[in-house]
Image (cartoon, helix red, strand yellow):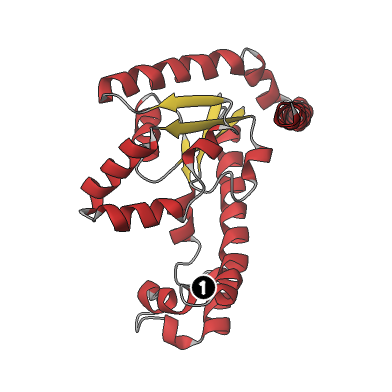
Amino acid sequence: MLVIGLTGGIATGKSTVSTLLQTHGVPVVDADVLAREVVQPGTPALAQIAAHFGAGVLRPDGALDRAALGAIVFADEAQRAVLNSIVHPAVRRAMFWEVLRHWRRGERVCVLDVPLLIEGGLWKYVAKVVVVYCSPEIQLQRLMKRDRSSRQDASARLTAQLPIAEKVQYGDIVIDNSGTLQDLESQVSGLVTKLNKEAGWWWRVSWLLPPIALISAVWILGWRTVRRAQKSTSKKRRAKA
């Protein structure tokens, strides 16, 4: 099974691409959804959060009070780091089990929809990285329209993120969402065809013979590491020239 990482910038259309992939029958593991699930009442992550931040971050029904927690972590980088150290590992574990579940079902391809795929380093552990791109100006205009925010506020939100141009450098496949929805649908359709073709015939064999799947995964990740090192070396050489 090919495990694909899907990412993009705010307002580039990553969620739309994720939805389109699902209409083509491609299973998508959404990190944002899992991030909410791992802090539901009764979960170890929520217990850790309450133990560190206090009962004030819980609602009367025992659910997480996101507003109260946000008021703490957004004003304190150290506290935000603590929260991330609790939630991120829980999300990664949940993602692993979701991928395993899709593999056991015999899926050809599984997509990990992760906004911070690059920033969190998860791009290293997928077979391919798909980046949803649009020009920074279009991204800005879409964000302003979506959130009904001023140009200044929207620009500040974009500045706080890794620029989409930098994310593109990590992409094995780039989907340009600067055009119409029809253009986007065409690109996604082509992507699904490409991924299913690359999954090849061996996906059935790897499902029946787990050792083959393990060897294949190690090979893919090893090749990604080599290829990324080659790209990095090439960029340094061009910079020096």
At label 1, which amino acid type do we have? Leu
Quarter in which the N terminus is drawn: top right
Tell me which corner region of the image, top left, top right, bottom left or bottom right, holds residue 234: top right
Q: Position of residue 55 (x, y in %)?
A: 46, 87
Quarter in which the C terminus is drawn: top right
Residue 200, placed above or below residue 220: above
Tell me which corner region of the image, top left, top right, bottom left or bottom right, holds residue 132: top left
Q: Position of residue 168 (x, y in %)?
A: 53, 33
* Residue nearer the viewer, 145 or 84: 145
In the image, taking residue 132 as reference, residue 169 lies left or right, namely: right
Instruction: Name the residue rendered at 35%, 52% in the picture.
Output: 155
Q: Position of residue 160 (x, y in %)?
A: 46, 56
Q: Around disc 1, counting alpha carbons within 10 Å, would you say few (fewer than 14), some (14 to 19), or many (20 or more)? A: many
* Residue nearer the viewer, 108 or 169: 169
How many tags in the picture?
A: 1
What kind of element bears circle 1?
helix
Residue 25, placed above or below residue 161: above
Residue 70, placed above or below residue 175: below
Instruction: Name the residue rendered at 42%, 73% in the picture.
Output: 70
Outermost residue toward the bottom in this view: 55
Query: Which residue in the protein does label 1 denote?
Result: 46
Is any part of residue 207 visible from this angle?
A: yes
Tell me which corner region of the image, top left, top right, bottom left or bottom right, holds residue 62: bottom left
* Residue nearer the viewer, 221 or 116: 116
Instruction: Name the residue rendered at 41%, 78% in the picture.
Output: 71
Residue 135, placed above or below residue 116: above
Is any part of residue 107 visible from this angle?
A: no
